Image (tube, rainbow, N blue to C red):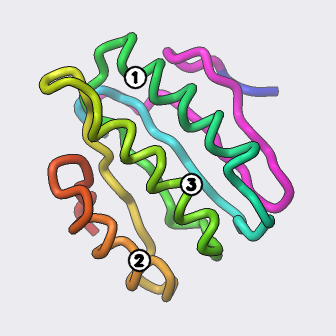
Amino acid sequence: MWIMNKLNIEPLQVEKASLVIRDNKEGENEDGILLIISGEIDMRDPSVAILPYLLNIHDALIAHEIKTISVDFSNLNYVNSSGIKTMISWLMKSKDVQSGKGYKVKIIRNGDIAWQESTFPVIQKLFPDVVTFAEE
């Protein structure tokens, strides 16, 4: 059973990974939207299941004029290069939105997970106007 969120998007469970959208309590971030990605993304082509889900979130954020989404990766223990490519495809969609209508992605990361420490700084350099980091 899932708890309704203001975007009306159900969770996604795919192989060893889960993606859950929830409303934050007021004050946790500007718009109160949190995407939690946990488990492992190691399937051959995660874009088949995960990218449509992320693009659905993208469309809902634009439609609801939400300016910030927090994405919690702190329990995503592993992601392969295809999974990183899928995330970059999603971030490119936000970057391509007309000025003033896009949203920021605030990343919550786990400094104890090696792939996160090496990958997220590079992603932030690729998308400096889109990606920020939550205070650790």
Q: Residues within 10 Å of mark 2 (few under 14, many from 20)?
A: few
Q: Residue at x 63, y 66 (%)?
A: 82
- Quarter of the picture holding the C terminus: bottom left
Residue 50 in the image: above or below residue 37: above
Measured Cα–Cα span from mark 2 to mark 3: 13 Å
Disc 3 is placed on an element classified as helix
| Residue 124, image quadrant | bottom left
Q: Is residue 15 magenta?
A: yes
Q: Residue at x 56, y 54 (%)?
A: 86
Amino acid type at image mark 2: Thr
Q: Residue at label 1?
A: 61
Amino acid type at image mark 3: Thr
| Mark earlier in primary sequence (1, 3) | 1
Q: Is residue 16 magenta?
A: yes
Q: Residues within 10 Å of mark 1 (few under 14, many from 20)?
A: many
Q: How many marks can you see?
A: 3
Horizontal relation, residue 58 to residue 30: left or right: right
Measured Cα–Cα span from mark 2 to mark 1: 25 Å
* Magenta residues (range): 4-27
Q: Nearer the viewer, mark 1 or mark 3?
A: 3
- Residue 119's label in the rendered image is 2
Disc 2 is placed on an element classified as helix
Q: Residue at label 3?
A: 86
The answer to whether residue 27 shows anywhere in this view is no
